Image: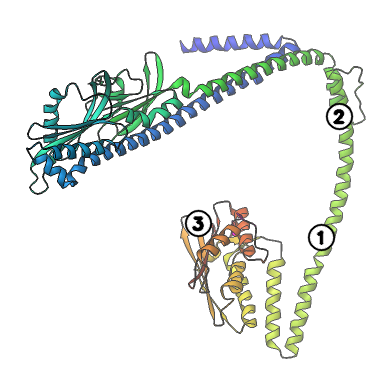
Amino acid sequence: MRGSIRGTVRRTGERLWVFFANLNMQQKLLIVFLTLVCLPLFMIGYASSYYYTRSIKATTTAYATEITSKMLLKLDDYVTDLYNMSAMPLYNKEFLNWLSDPGTSLAKSQGMDLYISNLNKIKPDTVSVYVFDNYGNISYNIKSGGKRSNLDQVKDEWAAIAAKGDGKPMLLSTQEVSAGKENYYAFSVIRELKQVKDLSPIGFIVFDTNTTAINRQIEDFDQVTKGKTILVDEHDRVVFDSEGAQTTHDLSGDESIRKATAERGSFPIEIDGRKYITTYARSALTGWKMFVYIPLAEATSQATVTRNVTLLISAVFVTIALLIAIAISYALTRPLSKIKTLMQEVQTGNLDVSFNQKYRDEVGLLGRHFNIMVTRVRDLLEEVKETQTRKKEAEYAALQSQINPHFIYNTLETIRMKAEVNDDEEVADMTFTLGKLLRYGVNHAEQRVTIADELDHLSNYVALQNKRFANKYTLVVDIPERESRIVSIKLMLQPIVENAIHHAFKHRTGPGTIRIGVRREGETAVFTVADDGSGVDEARLRLLRERVYGQVPLDPSGRGIGLHNVHERIKLQFGEHYGLRIESRPGEGTTVELAIPAGRGGEEAM
């Protein structure tokens, strides 16, 4: 079965190829154009649109999830304020005495009414405050409308909830409240009130808060997302619905409730044939969950517009390009053989050819540019010949320039010999050391050296400095033989030590010590150059780092130039993961770390 399928596919492919081979040149050009240009263009446009839409969805989901959590935190803050308000009577001794007094004096009634009125003014969305004592008396304050029409029915439920809380605030989910001619949705905070001295219950307080308090937290976000927000309590009853259609409804069997199993998250959902991005978060304070539904079409509307415009523009350009390709292919089928013959002549090395341009069409212009190309090739060949000649002259001049370093070396050697003849050993040693430094630095034959070479050069440099400053500096090298074969760039350590001598010990009259060590960090070798100089404060260290890393211009006075140079050369030689790190504290000295690959000499140095 598989063999027959493969045979059929092969025969079909052969027939298609024969059909394509028998087409004329113009048709072949058009088919190739459509296959290699139009198809990839539309595929790229589709892929770009797909991933752009996907990115928009991911960004919108992440943003909405974060905003959902923040809105829930704001709501928690609001509920916390209500909890605190319900506890305020516990700090008013006079109010507690009134509540525990079975009497009904005018002073008590006026005092309690004034206090409750003040409590009801704290938050703009609290509609009413009810206070019940143990003697069947009720005190309340209503901002608008009238008191609850079902107050007699709910007070026993409130009393049970307050007793269950045992002095802690209890949150009652949203209920539809009827107050005279006005109906509204409100959630309640209930707290049992107790005497401070013996903690005996003396009544309870209830705050009814309009759900407009919740709407204030989310209305701006809903306007931006063109979606809706639903808040459900721990029993999956709707506390708030920004559309107002499901408030107080039971959503126990709703798909959103089943999917919201974590503390916060997101998921796609389809409601009434419309797709939504749904984010949710659970309040640790109230146990309520907030669901934000963002219409997918709204979230990706910009991506859809971008996709449609991109496809439209692509179609327009493809159509234009197709028409141009048809015209060009038709014009090219006749004179192309002539151009092909001329190109074959050029390929053999004959540049004395020219295309006879009869018409100013596309092929005629191509022939003109062909003539220009041939002329340019002839000119370039002449330029190459001239460049080769000049190159040989430059190499000869560079060879002559090598005389200058040799002249310096020979002159220093003559000075050294003269000093030895005159028994001036110190001058002879300094001249000999300086010559070694110059030979090491000026020699361009090899830019990568071993750490051992660097340490030899560094010891010569410190020796010269000690000649100048009466053995002021002590160089302590703690690098094992195994690590001394690591390959580094030339002049890596000496500029660091030079920087320490010029800056770390600038204001010190006594001796100074410079320690050089090494440690391994995986495949990286980290060499440390530490001095016990004056160090720098945090601000100057930050500025020095910025100069070394090229984040700010270098100091015209020269501070940090050597460090910057070493850092850049290490990155150029070994990669961006390597370079310098600087640490310093005032009075404790400075440590410079140089990270390079831990490769060894031998084959890597070669």
Marks 2 and 1 sit apart, C-alpha to C-alpha, by 38 Å
Horizontal side of 285 relative to 376 (left or right) equals left
Q: Earlier in the sequence, mark 3 or mark 1?
A: 1
Question: How many neighbours does mark 1 have within 10 angstroms: few (below 14), some (14-19), or many (20 or more)?
Answer: few
Q: Is residue 550 magenta?
A: yes
Residue at left 26%, top 18%?
A: 181
Q: Is residue 474 above or below residue 226?
A: below
Given the image, on which type of amino acid does mark 2 rest? Val
Q: Is residue 481 left or right of residue 33?
A: left
Asked if residue 315 lies left or right of residue 158, the reply is right
- Residue matched to label 3: 524
Say which residue label 1 marks: 398
Q: CA distance from mark 3 to mark 1?
A: 38 Å
Q: Nearer the viewer, mark 2 or mark 1?
A: 1
* Amino acid at circle 1: Ala
Which image quarter: residue 27? top right
Front one among 308 and 42: 308
Say what secondary structure mark 2 lies in.
Answer: helix
Q: Give the secondary structure at mark 3.
A: strand
Given the current orientation, which residue lies at the most extreme bottom position? 423
Magenta span: 548-554
Residue 434 shows in this picture: yes
What's the CA distance linking mark 2 and mark 3? 55 Å
**Label 2: few (<14), some (14–19) or many (≥20) C-alpha neighbours in 10 Å:** some
Front residue (pair 130, 363): 130
Image quarter in which the N terminus is found: top left
Where residue 406 sits: x, y (%)?
78, 71
| Front residue (pair 490, 466) | 466
Q: Amino acid at mark 3?
A: Thr
Q: Is residue 104 magenta?
A: no
Question: Which of the marked residues, 2 or 1, is nearer the chain's N terminus?
Answer: 2
Residue that label 2 marks: 346
